[in-house]
Image: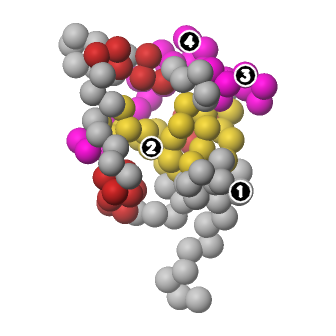
């Protein structure tokens, strides 16, 4: 069993987990000053993110690159998302590490206020 991950993709997202999102290089996602716009966190289907799922950060980066994502990879602690009442719903049927960040258990799209708060909580990981 040594070296095996005990990660369960169906488990609730824990506070200690790190969440990742690729922010594409589209104009609407970036302010003129180079900062990420709140629009980068708006998605009508719920905000798609990856949880670390016991992966080292380099493995997360490699997985994003293998899936042909482009732009800037950013991260945030799950605890920070929960502090601003973002509902985190695991969706492993698409990808074992896939999570939707939702406004609530019944509302898909994050509120403007939550998107604005989130952009100040993220950190840049790397360019993809």
Check if mark 3's residue and mark 4's residue have beta carbons within 8 Å.
Answer: no
Give the residue furthest to the right: 106
3 or 2: mark nearer the eye: 3
Q: For marks 1 and 3, give the one nearer the viewer.
A: 3
**Does residue 126 belong to the magenta stretch?**
yes
Q: Is residue 7 above or below residue 19?
A: below
Colouring method of the image: secondary structure
Where residue 47 appears, x then y in whole percent?
55, 31
Instruction: Name the residue tied to disc 4.
Output: 113
Question: Of the numbered discs in the image, which one, if any, rests on residue 23?
Answer: none
Q: Which residue is mark 2?
A: 20
Query: Callout 4 environment at 10 Å: few (<14), some (14 to 19), or many (20+)?
Result: few
Mark before the other along the chain sequence, 1 or 3:
1
Which residue is the site of mark 3? 107
Describe residue 88's horizontal placement relative to residue 52 as left or right: right
The foreground one among 60 and 24 is 24
Q: Identify the residue position indicated by label 1 in the image.
A: 11
Of the two numbered discs 1 and 2 on the same chain, state the one appearing first in sequence: 1
Residue 52 visible to the viewer: yes
Query: Closest to the observer: 93 or 2?
Result: 93
Q: What x and y, as percent, mark residue 24?
A: 33, 31
Residue neighbourhood size for the residue with mark 2, other residues' Cα within 10 Å, grouped as few (<14), some (14–19), many (≥20) = many
Secondary structure category for the residue under label 3? loop
């Amino acid at each position: 069993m040594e070296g095996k991950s005990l990660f369960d993709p169906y488990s609730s997202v824990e506070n200690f987990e790190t969440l990742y999102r690729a922010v594409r290089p589209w104009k609407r996602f970036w302010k003129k000053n180079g900062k990420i716009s709140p629009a980068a966190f708006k998605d009508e289907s719920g905000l798609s993110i990856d949880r670390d799922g016991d992966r080292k950060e380099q493995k997360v980066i490699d997985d994003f690159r293998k899936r042909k994502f482009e732009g800037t990879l950013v991260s945030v602690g799950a605890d920070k998302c929960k502090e601003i009442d973002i509902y985190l719903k695991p969706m492993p049927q698409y990808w074992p590490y896939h999570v939707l960040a939702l406004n609530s258990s019944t509302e898909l799209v994050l509120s403007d206020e939550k998107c604005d708060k989130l952009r100040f909580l993220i950190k840049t990981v790397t360019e993809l």
